[in-house]
Image: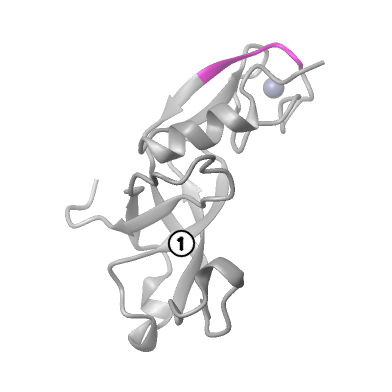
Amino acid sequence: MEPKLSIKEYYEGLNNNRLLGLKCKACSTITTPPRLACRQCGSLENEITQLSGKGSILTFTSIHVGVENRRGKTPYLVVMIKLDEGPWIMGNLEGVDPSTATLDLIDKRVVMNNPHCDKIPAEGIAPVFIPKSTPT
Ligand SMILES: [Zn+2]
């Protein structure tokens, strides 16, 4: 059985700055990145939904030795975001200098701002977040 939202569709969404997830028809929990079953109740009854891309920083780390496709682009910040719709998601944080990043980043509001990637397939790209200037 295939998830309603395939990984390919998920990455195509990211590449167009759209964060997609699955909304459970049984308990309304939103799951992203997509999985076959609801992360809360395990139901297989779900529908594709678009998330706001807004959330708060739970934690972060600064990467100084990058993976192969990030060589020469270090340091950079990897963040864990609690999305407004509930799920936690890992991504990159831009717009903040990694050398000056402090614990003040915790709880800061962010919004997804994925640059379009022409490399096909775009699989493997991570959601990119930037600080949100106005609190909501
Ligand atoms: Zn559920």
Query: Compared with residue 129, is residue 96 higher up or lower down, i.e. above or below?
Result: below
Residue appearing at x 43%, y 76% in the figure: 73
Q: Position of residue 79 (x, y in %)?
A: 50, 64
Would you say the magenta stretch is mainly helix, strand or loop? Answer: strand
Tell which of 72 and 41 is nearer to you: 72
Residue 18 lies, in percent from the top left, at 39, 33
Image quadrant for the N terminus?
Answer: top right
- Give the extent of the magenta segment: 44-48
Q: Please tell me whether residue 132 is drawn above or below residue 69 in the rendered image.
A: above
Say which amino acid is labelled 1.
Asn
Residue 105 lies, in percent from the top left, at 38, 72
Q: Which residue is mark 1?
A: 92
| Residue at 61 percent of width and 72 percent of height | 67
Per the image, label 1 sits on a secondary structure element best described as: strand
Split into quadrants, the picture shows ligand 1 in the one at top right
Q: Is residue 53 above or below residue 106?
A: above
Q: Is residue 46 magenta?
A: yes
Is 53 one of the magenta-colored residues?
A: no
Tell how many labels: 1
What color scheme is it?
one colour
Q: Is residue 106 left or right of residue 78?
A: left
Q: Which residue sits furthest bottom?
A: 99
